[in-house]
Image: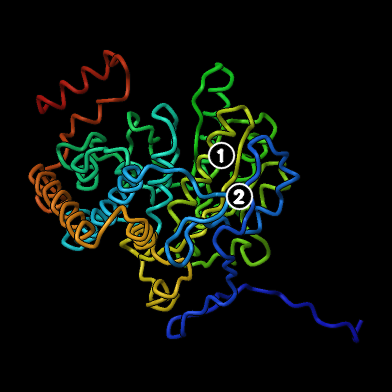
Amino acid sequence: MSDTTPLHFDVPEPSARPGDVPDFSFFDVPPAGAVRRPELNVDPTEIRDLAYSLIRVLDDEGRAVGPWAPEVDPDALRRGLRAMMKTRAYDDRMQRAQRQGKTSFYMRCTGEEAIAVGLALELGPGDMFFPTYRQQGWLVARDWPLVDMMCQLFSNEKDRLHGRQMPVMYSARDAGFFTISGNLGTQFIQAVGWAMASAIMGDTRIASGVVGEGTTAEADFHYALTFAATYRAPVILNVVNNQWAISSFQGIAGGDAATFASRAVGHGIPALRVDGNDYLAVLAASRWARDRARGNGGPTLIEWVTYRAAAHSSSDDPSKYRPLDEWKAWPLGDPIQRLVAHLIGSGGWSDDQQAQLQGDVDEEVRAAAKEAESYGTLLDGRVASSTSIFDDVFAEMPPHLRRQREQLESGD
């Protein structure tokens, strides 16, 4: 065996490290409109190529081209633009609040706004969304009160969750927004189970779950796909490939070997790979998967290709593992700027209107923050009462817990 070549242990490396020039030459960006759009009832084996291509609608001039270009009313596009801009303004304000010590933790979704907003506006009011911690755009798009979201971050006396969840772990059943779990992977299992239950009951509602690309390397991801495929669950399985799982780039999860969408192919699930920074492509792919699920066509897995422009969280320093300006070199651009370019180019928008909208959303977020802070922040200790630990646990509180709460209230 002495003449045998030694084995090599390979560890994937990102294309650039801190101090390097950002390099996305490995990333193939096909022309907008180049990918075919199959019929809803297509057999998954006939569209395997869509797991490796990239669905794009907006070209470099902001024009909507190709078979995936959706029919969207201009007012609906402006609503989506406003929701994305408000989400970014909210993120900026709450990041500053964290730095000021008003909340202990925050996570931004800068650069990923189109995905959550598009899904929120394409799914129905009765459908259930199982989010991770970077889909605040869903709540914003569904007009959930910003003050309510901010109070959850501040864990103050108006926090409906009574400070029991860490900041950004929202819960809004009335908005179809399932309670966020910090343990990633649960979202897919829960979404598939919820969708199966809806089908068993003969309901018409579907589910949609989200994980990041790093979570596709976990067992829960594959358990969920197995059940979704076996029982043809009416569910949309979203993989947000934002290139980074905390400080590990997407190659560590297997992204260099194959696309994340292709992981659905072996399960017999149709898979789409979509430009997640193209708002019109997000709408089109969401509609396709939604209509397929609603029509008893079963699950669809969508890999949304995007980039996490901000730090993983307020506890993260991305300058330690990637170039500082890498986001600016991302070849798919900024989802907000691309939608603005489309609206202006189609004659439905202007620079003056854009400036006015920016001022409006900034003022709306500022006013909401002022109100939320009036109810308390981490700085002043105006948190939920200790007696709230008994609330929202049982539909009818047992006698022994009532006695304990009375003792706590009386100070005995």
On screen, residue 236 above or below 316: above
Looking at the picture, which amino acid does disc 1 mark? Ala
Spot occupied by residue 146 in the image (x, y as percentages of width and height) = 21, 43
Foreground residue among 206 and 224? 206
Q: Which residue is mark 1?
A: 289
Cα separation between marks 1 and 2: 9 Å
Q: In screen coordinates, is 333 left or right of 273?
A: left
Helix, strand, or loop for circle 1? helix
Q: Nearer the viewer, residue 83 or 98?
A: 83
Q: Residues within 10 Å of mark 2 (few under 14, many from 20)?
A: many
Q: How is the image coloured?
A: rainbow
In the rendered structure, the answer to whether residue 298 lies left or right of residue 304 reads: right
Q: Could you say which quadrant of the image residue 118 lies in?
A: top left
- Residue for point 64% across, 31% down: 297
Residue 17 seen anywhere in this rendered image of the structure: yes
Q: Callout 2: helix, strand or loop?
A: strand
From this viewpoint, is residue 105 visible? no
289, above or below 110, in the image: above
| x 38%, y 48%: residue | 135
Residue 73: give its label.
none
Q: Which comes sooner in the sequence, label 1 or label 2?
A: 2
Residue at (70%, 38%) from the top-left corner? 42
Residue 313 position (above or below residue 117): below
Residue that mark 2 sits on? 272
Q: Quadrant of the N terminus?
A: bottom right
Quadrant including the C terminus? top left
Q: Quadrant of residue 193?
A: top right
- Disc tally is 2
Q: Are marks 1 and 2 in contact (CB under 8 Å)?
A: yes
Q: Residue 295 in the image: state x and y as whole percent.
A: 59, 27
Kind of residue indicated by mark 2: Leu
**Residue 8 point in image, percent of width and height:** 74, 78
